[in-house]
Image (cartoon, rainbow, N blue to C red):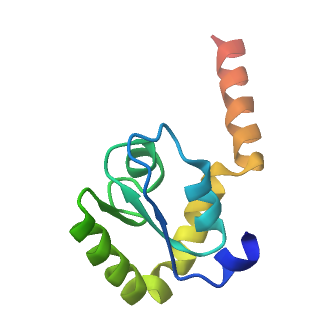
Amino acid sequence: MYHVLGRSAAFIHVRPHEPFGIVVAEAMAAGAVPIVHKSGGPWIGIVRLGRYGLGFVTEEEAVTSICRALELADKLRTVVIRRSYEFSYGMFKQKLKEIIYEIGVN
């Protein structure tokens, strides 16, 4: 999977109403520009309403987003890889430590 994603310019996640979609973050870690349905968690929490990728609702928007992602792939590759670090195990541990510290302080 990572071999294919590493050679991909874009990744389209077509499942609507997805709660989170870790596969989107994995695709981003491989450098693929994410294209997600605007109805769920990947659009809000990972792609940040278009800041780190593209979104769609209709089939026509999906096609347009694929074409746009291919145009932007070289420019966004580093950006999406950096964004994917926010979902890494190391970042999870760091955020958990901060929460535990905050609870201990209060």
Q: Residue at x 75, y 78 (%)?
A: 3
Considering the image in quadrants, where does the N terminus appear?
A: bottom right
Could you say where residue 43 lies in the image, as x and y percent from the top left?
39, 51
| Residue lying farthest to the front in this orientation | 59
- Whole-percent x and y of residue 37? 36, 54
The answer to whether residue 52 is above or below residue 49 is: below
Q: Give percent across and percent down for residue 14.
A: 43, 57
Identity of the residue drawn at 39% across and 40% down: 17
13 displayed left or right of 78 = left
Q: Which residue appears at 63% of the width and 10% of the height?
A: 106
Q: In which image quadrant can residue 27 be found?
A: bottom right
Residue at the outermost top position? 106
Of residues 39 and 52, which is closer to you in this image? 39
Name the quadrant containing residue 4.
Answer: bottom right
In the image: residue 3, left or right of residue 52: right
Q: On the picture, is 12 further left or further right than 24?
A: left
| Residue 67, above or below 24 | below
The front one of 62 and 102 is 62
Q: Nearer the viewer, residue 63 or 32?
A: 63
* Image coords of residue 32 (percent x, y): 55, 74
- Above or below 4: residue 53: above
Q: Is residue 14 above or below residue 33?
A: above
Label tally: 0
Residue found 61% across the figure and 55% down from its top: 23
